[in-house]
Image (cartoon, rainbow, N blue to C red):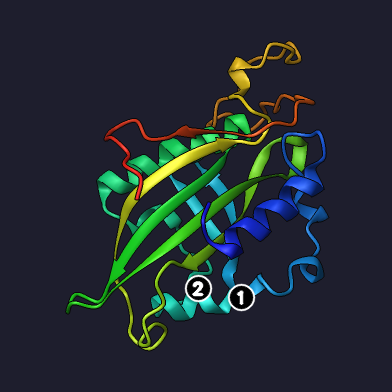
């Protein structure tokens, strides 16, 4: 996580969750992240293949030249990148991981901008992760950003962060519960009181290289 917007949103989310896997959706106070709101979004997990934008900040929509509310995040990328995002978000959902993605967007005529996207899990109803708080921060900010639509998007690199220091399946003192499967909406999320920080490289279909 290299961009200030990503770091500030993560710090807010991490402080809010305490020793839980994730905070609840309705604990998010817009006034507490007022400076970051134009760069933030809320996703809703409709099903395994549909991650719908419920809200998207004005700077995000302006940067891409499109209204994102109601759109499926996975539908904004090609099949390969969409598959990677699907798998990464499945781990964010099942293990309360944090996803950090770098994407590239271009106008098809030589103008290209890069963005850091952060996705943080939120517990919604029935103690399951069905919402996600996120941010989109430009890595480079060309003067034309926000004036030119960017209809072509691709995933450059990605990684998962487990704020408690380990993937949930690796933590020794988990509550004895059945595994969480993203397609089973009634499954419950597990807890850990550990508070460490370790980064794991993500991705299951192609290698991930750092900048």
- The disc at residue 38 is 1
State left or right for residue 202 relative to residue 105: right
Residue at position x 72%, y 50% in the image: 13
Image coords of residue 79 (percent x, y): 26, 47
Where is 133 relative to 137, above or below? above
Label 1 with label 2: CB-CB less than 8 Å: yes
Q: How many marks?
A: 2
Where is 193 relative to 53, above or below? above
Q: Quadrant of residue 6?
A: bottom right
What SS does tag 1 mark? Answer: helix
Residue placed furthest toward the left: 109
Q: Is residue 208 visible?
A: yes
Residue at position x 78%, y 58% in the image: 28
Label whose residue precedes the other's in the sequence (1 or 2): 1
Q: Quadrant of residue 27?
A: bottom right
Image coords of residue 126 (percent x, y): 76, 36
> Which residue matches tag 2?
60
For label 1, count other residues whose C-alpha is less than 10 Å away and answer few (under 14), some (14-19) or many (20+): some
Q: Is residue 56 visible?
A: no
For label 2, count other residues whose C-alpha is less than 10 Å away and answer few (under 14), some (14-19) or many (20+): many
Q: Quadrant of residue 133?
A: bottom right
State left or right for residue 100 relative to residue 33: left
Residue at position x 76%, y 15% in the image: 175
Q: Considering depth in this image, is 47 or 198 the residue closer to the camera?
A: 198
Where is 90 relative to 46, above or below? above
Q: Considering depth in this image, is 81 or 185 the residue closer to the camera?
A: 81
């Amino acid at each position: 996580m290299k961009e200030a917007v990503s770091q500030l949103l993560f710090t807010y989310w991490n402080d809010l969750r305490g020793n839980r896997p994730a905070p609840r959706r309705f604990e998010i106070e817009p006034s507490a992240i007022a400076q970051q709101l134009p760069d933030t979004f809320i996703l809703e997990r409709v099903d395994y293949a549909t991650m719908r934008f419920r809200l998207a900040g004005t700077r995000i929509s302006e940067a891409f030249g499109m209204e994102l509310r109601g759109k499926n995040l996975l539908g904004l990328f090609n099949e390969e990148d969409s598959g990677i995002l699907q798998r990464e978000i499945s781990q964010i959902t099942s293990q309360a991981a944090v996803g950090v993605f770098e994407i590239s967007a271009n106008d098809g005529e030589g103008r290209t901008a890069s963005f850091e996207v952060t996705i943080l899990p939120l517990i919604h109803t029935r103690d399951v992760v069905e919402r996600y708080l996120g941010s989109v921060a430009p890595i480079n900010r060309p003067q034309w950003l926000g004036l030119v639509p960017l209809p072509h998007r691709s995933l450059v690199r990605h990684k998962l962060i487990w704020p408690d220091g380990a993937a949930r399946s690796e933590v020794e003192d988990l509550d004895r519960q059945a595994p969480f499967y993203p397609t089973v909406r009634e499954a419950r999320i597990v807890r850990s009181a550990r508070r460490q920080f370790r980064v794991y490289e993500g991705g299951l279909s192609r290698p991930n290289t750092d900048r």
